[in-house]
Image (cartoon, grey):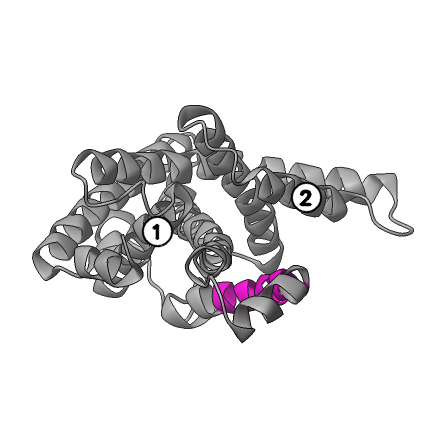
Amino acid sequence: MTLQEYLDHYLVWQDMLKFLLIALGALMGCILVIIIFVRAVAAFASGGYKKSLFSKKALNAVQRFYDIIFSGASILSFLSIFYLIDRFVEAGEFRDFWDAHKDFILLLMIVLSIVFNNILDRILVPLRKITRSEMASVRLAGMLYVILIFIYIKYVYENNNYDGFIMYFLGLMVGRFVYFDVSFRESLKTLKDGMMQIPIMIMGLGCTAFMCYIGFGSKYLLISNGVLVSTFIAHIFLIAGIFIIHHSHIVLLFTGGRYKGDD
């Protein structure tokens, strides 16, 4: 299939609407699980403090869940663009330039993915209920999130095209822990902060897996254009769903919190 044929397949509005509704359902299911879990934990708090603790912790957990989706989508975005350029641009001056400089272009795309991530979680859906340190640890977990997606693609779909990406991101993760003049205590704190996000990361992976299962099963997501690209397309619908859910304030009905005037 050509690039235009892929676009014609994905841009049928009826199919897009159906997949968006599936994304909304998957997201709300995950959000309700998070809220129920936080409510169960908050039940052990003292009487007057119980309600405020639940509201604060629930919104914090939900927004960390949003951010793990954003983080994964940001990384997958530039990898998908990299893959599509490498696949569909076959000849010409740009191809020569690409072959000569694609390693440096990949580094530039990493920087752009950080900018994209900031646009998602600070402008599109402002995540004011999580701290900067929590956001940093979520993004660290986001690297592991993407590595696990790669491993799934490698062993389930028996696709070895992304082995280089796996090693690249493993190197980035190690770099977060081991860098010049870092102390052992700081490395442990970074590791601990990242481990705290594992439950949210697992929730995000479950949501992504559900979207891919439905997408590939219904033939809306195509393996032929690359499992990586199709997984990113699923994330686009998840981002759209998060935007709708966040700005509709429906989560506030379950938590009793508020977005404006956050401390």
Q: Is residue 63 left or right of residue 173?
A: left
Q: Quadrant of residue 6?
A: bottom left
Q: Which residues are magenta?
A: 104-118
* Amino acid, disc 1: His
For disc 2, the marked residue is 173
Q: Residue 67 location in percent, x, y?
A: 45, 53
Q: Earlier in the sequence, mark 2 or mark 1?
A: 2
Badge 1 crowding class, 10 Å Cα cut-off, few under 14, some 14 to 19, many 20 or more, is many
Q: Is residue 78 left or right of residue 234?
A: right
Secondary structure at badge 1 equals: helix
Q: Residue 250 location in percent, x, y?
A: 21, 56
Q: Quadrant of residue 4?
A: bottom left
Q: Which is more toward the observer, 117 or 188?
A: 117
Main SS of residues in magenta:
helix
Q: How many marks?
A: 2
Magenta residue check for 161: no
Q: Between marks 2 and 1, how big is the CA–CA gap?
A: 22 Å
Secondary structure at badge 2 equals: helix
Q: Residue 14 location in percent, x, y?
A: 8, 56
Q: Residue 144 location in percent, x, y?
A: 57, 39
Pointers 2 and 1 in contact (CB under 8 A)? no
Q: Residue at x 56, y 55 (%)?
A: 135
Question: Could you tell me if residue 263 is visible in this image?
Answer: no
Q: Is residue 126 left or right of residue 165?
A: left
Q: Residue at x 45, y 39 (%)?
A: 200
Magenta residue check for 113: yes
Q: Is residue 212 above or below residue 100?
A: above
For disc 1, the marked residue is 235
Q: Residue furthest front?
A: 91
Q: Is residue 171 above or below residue 259?
A: above
Q: Residue at x 43, y 57 (%)?
A: 84
Q: Residue at x 75, y 47 (%)?
A: 175
